[in-house]
Amino acid sequence: MKKVSVVIPMYFEESVANECYNKVKNVTENLEKYDYEIIFVNDGSTDKTLSIIENIAKENKKVKVISFSRNFGHQAAVTAGLRASEGDAIIIMDADLQDPPELIPKMLKKWEEGYDVIYGKRTKRDGETVFKLLTAKAFYNILNKLSDVEIPKDTGDFRLVDKNVADVVCNLPEHNKFLRGLFSWTGYNQCPFEYERKERVAGKTKYSLKKMLKLASDGIFSFSSKPLKIIGYIGICFIIISIIFLICGIVIKDKTELNIILCIFSLFTGIIQISLWTIGEYISRIYDEVKGRPEYIINKKINL
């Protein structure tokens, strides 16, 4: 009998943990032809999240728990869950139930048709601000223009992946993983699965603006070197413009022109700073890889 693994990262989810488990269990227990396991990954929560999922795991041996020593981030939590999975097909979903567990049987049908990755494509996103919707759209547009690998728009981490694909991604040595991009990068036979994303059942989103920016930078800098080329082109353009204004200021001897030159050089200084920041982002990622530290530290395992 084939097995389905459901990987659920948890970060301060005490308000939804029980309901999430009940809904996922109801769906997976009723799957025909499949055994199941549910893997909760506690990403350093300091509320009651860990104690709740520990009690669930004591009652149901098919529930497995991984608990980090501290918060290492959503992508690290998903990676840990993927590595611990024994299923032939692995479902990745969040605990807030915005990604409905009821869709799992339909996703499995797509997998049975021969698709290796079935990624959720959101046709509607309830409960999200205009700012978040606009920035998400802008991010994917920018990322796809910069990247050599097309990453589907309006997608998140909610997806079904074949065990073989998960093994490939988990064995990649990079630390700052952008999983939805890596799954696209692997190739394989992939297809979208459209659905309407609901509001959170309870609690608040744990993805702050800072974390969203971190995820965005991981996506851009992990999948493209074009920013380095772009700042080079910008630098050349501004050098040419600065030379033109300098010549005009000398020939015309007009203080207004000299003021413009000062503005241009000030702007050029800003471009230099942005360039240094961009280069620094790449260097910092190289530094992370050279250090060779683990992506996460597991403090506790249950039923594993």
Image (cartoon, rainbow, N blue to C red):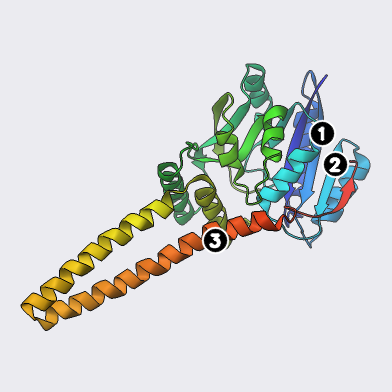
Residue assigned mark 3: 209
Q: Nearer the viewer, residue 78 or 295?
A: 295
User: Counting residues from the N terminus, which is met first, the one under dot 2 or under dot 1?
Assistant: 1
Picture residue at 66% right of the left edge, 31% below the top:
160
Residue occupying the far left of the picture:
252
Q: Quadrant of residue 166?
A: top right
User: Counting residues from the N terminus, which is met first, the one under dot 2 or under dot 3?
Assistant: 2
- Position in image of residue 123 (x %, y %): 49, 36
Residue occupying the far top of the picture:
113
Residue assigned mark 1: 37
- Position in image of residue 225 (x %, y %): 46, 49
Q: Nearer the viewer, residue 287 or 10?
A: 287
Image-based side of 47 in relation to 60, left or right = left
Q: Which mark is residue 64?
A: 2
Picture residue at 39% right of the left edge, 52% below the top:
229
Q: Disc 1 marks which amino acid? A: Glu
The answer to whether residue 179 of the structure is visible from this angle is yes
